[in-house]
Image (cartoon, grey):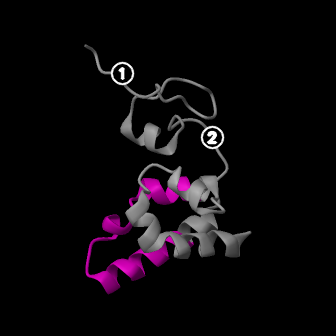
Amino acid sequence: PRRQRGATPHCRVCNAVLTATTAIMLRRCETCAVDIDEELLAQLKEWRLNLSKEMGVPAYVVFTDNTLIAIAEALPTDDAALTAIPGIGARKLEQFGADVLELVKARG
């Protein structure tokens, strides 16, 4: 018997089928234009760098650049919206969710 896979990912902007890992992560084609809060992205990167130094781990262990870009695009306002972003599961939500949501809220 064949195992069914999840739904085929589509771009949230143009609805094209997504195949590239980065595109699937961002839920859009890499060439599709979107609004992104550049200032929030810079703040998220600075927060991640400081936290990674405190933890003694590389910055990508906290969140990858693509995850930070997805946060700056989606502007999540609660736990459910944050965990809807690929790369953020229960553990990352528990560790970093409150900080990320606070940064997003402060930009609002």
Between residue 34 and residue 94, name the one nearer to us. Answer: 94
Position in image of residue 89 (x %, y %): 42, 57
* The quarter of the displayed image where residue 52 is located: bottom left
In-front residue for pair 46/94: 94
- Specify the label residue 33 is tagged with: 2
Quick one: label 1, few (<14), some, or many (20+) residues within 10 Å?
few
Query: Mark 1 vs mark 2: which is more N-terminal?
Result: 1
User: Is residue 70 shown in magenta?
Assistant: yes
Q: Which image quadrant: the C terminus?
A: bottom right
Which is more foreground, mark 1 or mark 2?
1
Q: Horizontally, is 32 left or right of 61 in the view?
A: right
Left or right of 92 on screen, residue 103 = right
The amino acid pointed to by label 1 is Gln
Point out which mark residue 4 bears.
1
Magenta segment range?
43-71
Q: Is residue 86 above or below residue 15?
A: below
Which quarter of the picture shows residue 32?
top right
- Considering the numbered disc 1 on the image, is that residue within a helix, a strand or a loop? loop
What is the residue that sits farthest to the top in this orientation? 1
User: Could you tell me residue 37's position as x and y percent?
Assistant: 65, 60
